[in-house]
Image (tube, rainbow, N blue to C red):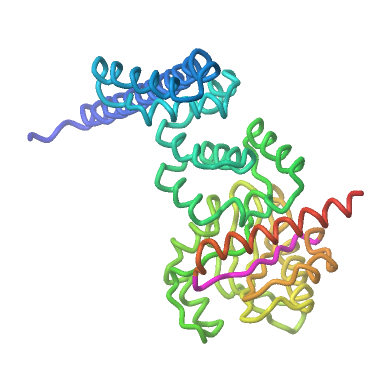
């Protein structure tokens, strides 16, 4: 192909961009209409058939509808798919919610979300998928690794979770409870059981992309072994990140032991130094994250770390059986919610 003149090359680039943007808008519009179509089909079947006949007759009617629709319109209208549409319309009976929120997702996203029974948990994944533009693969991975159960938000009372998710939907603004989690799963580092702190830090830096993915969207790397000079003493902060949406520096300390009360003093020193010497006028105060091999909920509560902008979390270099992790997180969540309700009563 002959080379193009610079002016023609610029024209070609502009036309490519125009075509790409139009195709993207067209795909989004088609997807939006499909989601509304599937909701409408599910709603109509639910109203006309299943509310009257939930037994064998209702099953036969849906089977007949699936057969006829598949003959006329091809794939996508099987009996199983029609039941998924009914489930969709049952879980989201408010058409306004579907038209304003859920039509931003693909039908494949919605099928993944339908597997979640808990309403608050499902709403969390809806909002985060829209905000961070998760692919279906990423959504499935987040659900599979119990992201909601690991988030700080899940430890709040249900009313607080609901209010937080409503605020996220309306403002699109992230809070720390929607950023920080416990535990963090670092099994991808491939560390030996008796690893040192230096090995842990080296492994994180060697696989920084995966570490930042586990930390969550919005994090960027700033420094390793950040020197903190106080008087005649030099201290070294293990990792320094920045969170774009929180507009905060995030100081991370790695501990190869159970959380100790003394860790708070060290982190407070780092945060005050960063606030004085590194924070810009447009930024919020820095946040501390202490990663330990084991947390201590009572210590953390008594020390009031949340008030000091300090988070404590466990890191796992080996992922336990999923059901074991789920039960453990469920117990932690119930304990945290009970304590918060007691504090507010």
Is residue 337 shown above or below 269? Answer: above
Q: In which quarter of the image is the N terminus?
A: top left
The answer to which quarter of the image holds residue 163 is top right
Residue 324 % position (x, y): 56, 65
Q: Does the magenta stretch include residue 10?
A: no
Whether the magenta-drawn stretch holds residue 315 is answered as yes
Residue 251 coordinates in the image, percent (x, y): 65, 66
Q: x and y percent of residue 8 in the render?
A: 21, 27
The structure residue drawn at horizontal position 82% and vertical position 58%, both measured from the top left corner, is 307
Near-viewer residue (274 or 118): 118
Residue at the limit of the structure toward the right, as seen here? 345
Q: Which residue lies furthest to the left in this view?
A: 1
Vertical placement of residue 218 versus 322, above or below:
above
Residue drawn at (69%, 64%), measured in percent from left and top?
288
State the image quarter where residue 315 is shown.
Answer: bottom right
Residue 309 horizontal/vertical position (percent): 76, 59
Looking at this view, is 320 or 242 the one in front? 320
Q: Nearer the viewer, residue 324 or 235?
A: 324
What range is drawn magenta here? 308-318
| 59 to 305, vertically: above or below | above
**Residue displayed at 75% across by 78% down:** 260
Q: Quadrant of the rendered structure where residue 64 is?
A: top left
């Amino acid at each position: 192909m002959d080379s193009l003149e610079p002016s023609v090359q610029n024209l070609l680039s502009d036309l490519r961009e125009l075509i790409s943007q139009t195709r993207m808008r067209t795909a989004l519009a088609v997807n939006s209409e499909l989601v509304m179509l599937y909701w409408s089909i599910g709603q109509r079947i639910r109203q006309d058939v299943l509310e009257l006949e939930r037994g064998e007759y209702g099953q036969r009617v849906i089977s007949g509808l699936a057969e006829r629709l598949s003959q006329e319109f091809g794939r996508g209208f099987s009996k199983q798919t029609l039941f998924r549409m009914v489930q969709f319309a049952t879980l989201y009976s408010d058409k306004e919610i579907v038209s304003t929120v859920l039509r931003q997702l693909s039908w494949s996203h919605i099928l993944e979300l339908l597997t979640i029974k808990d309403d608050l948990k499902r709403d969390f994944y809806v909002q985060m998928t829209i905000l961070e533009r998760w692919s279906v693969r990423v959504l499935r991975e987040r659900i599979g690794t119990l992201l909601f159960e690991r988030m700080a938000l899940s430890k709040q009372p249900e009313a607080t979770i609901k209010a937080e998710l409503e605020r996220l939907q309306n403002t699109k603004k992230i809070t720390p409870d929607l950023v920080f989690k416990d535990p963090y799963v670092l099994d991808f580092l491939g560390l030996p059981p008796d690893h040192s702190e230096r090995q842990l830090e080296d492994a994180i830096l060697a696989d920084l992309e995966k570490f930042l993915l586990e930390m969550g969207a919005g994090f960027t790397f700033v420094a390793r072994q950040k020197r903190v000079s106080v008087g005649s003493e030099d201290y070294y902060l293990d990792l320094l990140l920045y969170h774009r949406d929180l507009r905060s520096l995030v100081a991370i300390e790695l501990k190869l032991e159970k959380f100790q009360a003394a860790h708070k003093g060290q982190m407070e020193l780092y945060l005050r130094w960063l606030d004085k010497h590194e924070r810009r006028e447009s930024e919020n105060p820095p946040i501390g994250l202490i990663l330990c091999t084991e947390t201590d909920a009572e210590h953390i509560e008594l020390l009031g770390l949340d008030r000091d902008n300090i988070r404590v979390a466990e890191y796992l270099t080996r992922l336990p059986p999923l059901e074991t992790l789920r039960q453990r997180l469920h117990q932690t969540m119930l304990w945290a919610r009970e304590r918060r309700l007691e504090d507010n009563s």
